[in-house]
Image (tube, helix red, strand yellow):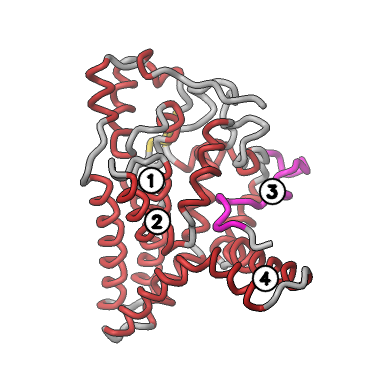
């Protein structure tokens, strides 16, 4: 197996510099989790207080991006970066970040660490997210339409569960065994979402769970997850260079609000130094820029420029992109 090349922090930072970047915090990760939920509540309140199509669209976009933000913070916890106490790290990220959006931290961690170990190599479990690119512009438009109309959500979350139930029944398993399998996969999601629905029902806003949580989860969240995946590894210039097999995208404030929350855009730095807390990545980027290192890294300005490159295949070129529809790590382990 081809293990991805690694870099040594000592090649880029003095000991004191590295210490300032790598120090764990007992409050910053928890604050970011609280911030994500605070933004979700404020965006939802905006629509509840001023209900109209414009505030609904804005609320769906902001909440969907913060749902991605929760997944990003759960991703940080997979690197034990949310809190120095691993039990607090895993509980907070598992229940407050992963479970509400349907991602199991325990299943995600080994999957994601394998991605880092074999980044952009044949054994990388995420390789299918980047390998099809570039694709044609019409192909990208079709993918975006599927995301925004809920088709991606249905295909990735509902269909596999239905198929797994059928498979287990075909194996002769009892209803109790099938239900236990379902609970193992979706139990934490059901608990977290059940609590949300119960709280909203208690305050007379039960309908907001469907309009302001499930709707963003089924539309904007798949789209920004797709954009994140494209920006991170698609069309990178050198799969064997640890400074160029992942991409950093310099995002403006609107992109950080609606597409790339919680420093996820600094993905090249994340792959170079995967155990850095996410809040240290902007500082690492500034320090690397001052040292002239970013000139050797894969860095782009804005998500629009990345999408142009990702959709640069000529329309007459059949390519392979249309056959790759995977958009994110497995939401949960398969049932059967």
Label 3 crowd (10 A; few <14 / some 14-19 / many >=20) = few
Q: Is residue 202 above or below residue 311?
A: below
Is residue 2 at all visible to an observer of this figure? yes
Chain part drawn in magenta? 313-333
Residue 196 is inside the magenta segment: no
Q: CA distance from mark 1 to mark 2?
A: 8 Å
Task: Give the mark, 2 or 4, whose residue is nearer the N terminus.
Answer: 2
Give neighbour class at mark 2: few <14, some 14-19, many 20+ (Cα, 10 Å).
many
**Mark 2 or 3, which is nearer the eye?**
2
- Given residues 60 and 305, the one toward you in this image is 60
Closest to the camera, between mark 3 and mark 1, is 1
Q: Secondary structure at mark 1?
A: helix
Task: Work out whether residue 239 or residue 259 is closer to the camera in this orientation and state it.
Answer: 239
Q: Above or below — where is 238 with respect to 187?
A: above
In space, the residues marked 3 and 1 are separated at their CA atoms by 28 Å
| Main SS, magenta residues | loop
Q: Which residue is mark 1?
A: 77
Badge 3 or badge 1: first in the primary sequence:
1
Residues at discs 1 and 2 in contact (Cβ within 8 Å) = yes
Return the residue at label 3.
324
Please state, as top left, top right, bottom left or bottom right, where the C terminus lies in the image. Answer: bottom right
User: Mark 2 or mark 3: which comes first in sequence?
Assistant: 2
- The answer to whether any part of residue 300 appears in the image is no
Viewed as shown, does residue 309 lie left or right of 24?
right
Which mark's residue is nearer the viewer, 2 or 4? Answer: 2
Q: Quadrant of the N terminus?
A: top right
Q: Which residue is mark 4?
A: 162
């Amino acid at each position: 197996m081809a293990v991805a090349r690694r870099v040594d922090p000592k090649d880029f930072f003095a000991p004191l510099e590295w210490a300032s970047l790598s120090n764990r915090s007992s409050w910053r990760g928890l604050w970011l989790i609280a911030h994500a939920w605070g933004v979700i509540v404020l965006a939802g309140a905006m629509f509840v207080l001023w209900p109209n199509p414009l505030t609904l669209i804005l609320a769906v976009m902001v909440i969907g991006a913060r749902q991605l933000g929760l997944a990003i913070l759960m991703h940080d916890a997979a690197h034990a970066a949310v809190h120095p106490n691993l039990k607090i790290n895993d509980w907070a990220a598992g229940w407050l970040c992963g479970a509400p959006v349907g991602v199991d931290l325990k299943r995600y961690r080994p999957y994601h660490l394998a991605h880092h170990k074999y980044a952009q190599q044949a054994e990388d479990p995420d390789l299918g997210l980047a390998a099809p690119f570039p694709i044609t512009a019409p192909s990208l438009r079709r993918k975006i339409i599927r995301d925004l109309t809920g088709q991606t959500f249905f295909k990735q979350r509902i269909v596999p569960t239905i198929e797994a139930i059928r498979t287990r029944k075909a194996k002769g398993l009892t209803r109790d065994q099938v239900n236990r399998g379902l609970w193992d996969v979706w139990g934490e999601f059901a608990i977290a979402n059940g609590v949300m629905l119960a709280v909203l029902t208690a305050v007379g806003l039960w309908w907001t769970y469907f309009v302001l949580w499930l709707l963003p989860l089924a539309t904007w969240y798949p789209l920004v997850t797709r954009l994140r995946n494209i920006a991170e590894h698609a069309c990178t210039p050198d799969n064997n260079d640890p400074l160029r097999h992942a991409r950093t995208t310099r995002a403006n404030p609107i992109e950080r609000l609606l597409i790339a929350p919680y420093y996820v855009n600094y993905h090249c730095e994340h792959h170079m130094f995967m155990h850095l807390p996410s809040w240290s990545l902007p500082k690492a980027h500034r320090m690397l820029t001052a040292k002239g290192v970013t000139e050797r890294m894969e860095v782009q300005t804005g998500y629009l420029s990345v999408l142009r490159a990702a959709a640069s295949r000529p329309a007459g070129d059949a390519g392979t992109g249309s056959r790759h529809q995977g958009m994110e790590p497995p939401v949960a382990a398969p049932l059967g």
